[in-house]
Amino acid sequence: MDAGPTGRRATLQDVAAVAGVSKATVSKALNGRDDVAGATRERVLAAVAELDYRPTTAGALLTQRRAVAVVFDLPASPYILKVLEGILAAATDARLDLVTRLAPDLGARRRRTVAREWIAEQRASGVVGIAGLTLSAPDALIDAAADAGIPFVMVDPVDTTNERMVSVASSNWAGARAAAEHLIALGHRRIGWIGGPEASGAAQDRFYGFNAAMDAAGLTVDPALVRADQFDVATGARHAHDLLTSADPPTALMAADDELAVGVLAAAHALGIRVPDDLSVTGFDDTSQAAWTTPPLTTVHQHLEGMGQMAVQALLTMAAGTWPASRHVELATSLTVRGSTGAAPATGTRRQDLVVDRSR
């Protein structure tokens, strides 16, 4: 909002007056100087948010173009890259610049002062909306953005139930259930699960979908065949090796994302296990690598570009002063069947003997 009764644009002096400090201290706080006490910096940032202060110096003229910021922890993920494609397309259509940001350190981002400083930096860069991609511990950032009047949308929320959050995700539960039902229809009864972090809402929903399909078919999920860990190839390979060399291995393995599934395929190959003759494998996401694995991966398709586009649309709606029709949007998923799944191996095969011999 404007600072004075005349409706004029807030000035540096207005911020100083509200914060109870000098103009020089305000300038130092906004420029990230380390000679400003934390409590003082927080008062300045609170005044900036209250007055909707925007710099009017010559240097600030460089930031007159509007931008969308995308913030994440792990930029190398194929999943992140596909969502970014959608965000870039939507931002381009809206004549917005796109800036990418690594989130503040995991411990630091939980601190209110750090979050407010980070949000203030984005505003000073011309950012009019922020999309967080599977971002851990985002609550302080969400709150700081809301206080500053900057829209913040989470894509695939990880570990937050923040009431101020707007999110875009996929129907993770339904997608995993469809993949499990596919394996059950192929005759698999001993199905293992390699999931993502327990703190991840998406990972939990996928696990619940798997459980729902097993329960509906009258099958029991063996706890010995369940793993929860990070979303990466090495993790999938490690857990798959352990499961496939156990005394009673699964005939199918469901992975909670494609990277985990790639690790499963690698472990099976190293052990001499044929996919899909001896083992069926499914993933989740349908990233570009899924069609190029050997064999091509059966996986749950998420409209990742659509999630990115939807996030930008929500940001623009909020920036215009209107809340989206729904604070939490889920896009439909579908199962893409490829060569990594097949009929369950006949009872009595000597697949485990082969595994034991190859792993010596």
Image (cartoon, grey):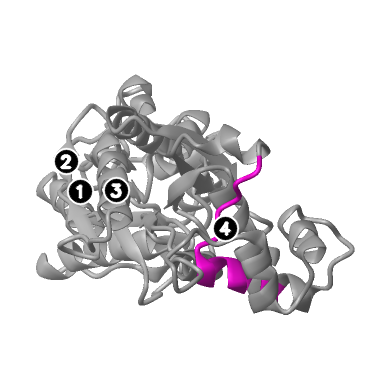
Q: Amino acid at mark 2?
A: Leu
Q: Nearer the viewer, residue 90 or 246?
A: 90
| CA distance for labels 1 and 4 | 40 Å
Question: Which type of secondary structure does the marked residue at label 3 adopt?
Answer: helix
Name the residue at the front extreme. Answer: 6
Residue 26 is situated, as x and y percent measured from the top left of the image, at 74, 63
Residue 166 is left or right of residue 46, and the answer is left
Q: Earlier in the sequence, mark 3 or mark 1?
A: 1
Please identify, in this view, whether the residue under mark 3 or under mark 2 is nearer the observer.
3
Q: Residue tagged by mark 1?
A: 179
Residue 94 is situated, as x and y percent measured from the top left of the image, at 29, 33
Q: Which residues lie in the magenta part?
A: 42-57
Q: Earlier in the sequence, mark 3 or mark 2?
A: 3
Q: Quadrant of residue 321?
A: bottom left
Q: Residue tagged by mark 2?
A: 335
Please identify, in this view, whether the residue under mark 1 or under mark 4 is nearer the observer.
4
| CA distance for labels 3 and 4 | 17 Å
| CA distance for labels 3 and 2 | 31 Å
Residue 110 is situated, as x and y percent measured from the top left of the image, at 62, 70
Q: Nearer the viewer, residue 344 or 70?
A: 70
Q: Residue tagged by mark 4?
A: 119
Question: Which type of secondary structure does the marked residue at label 1 adopt?
Answer: helix
Q: Nearer the viewer, residue 6 or 191?
A: 6
Question: Which type of secondary structure does the marked residue at label 4 adopt?
Answer: helix
Q: Earlier in the sequence, mark 1 or mark 2?
A: 1
Give me the residue at 31% from left, 60% from top.
Answer: 167
Based on the picture, tell me whether residue 46 belongs to the magenta stretch. yes
Please identify, in this view, whether the residue under mark 3 or under mark 1 is nearer the observer.
3
Q: Residue tagged by mark 3?
A: 316
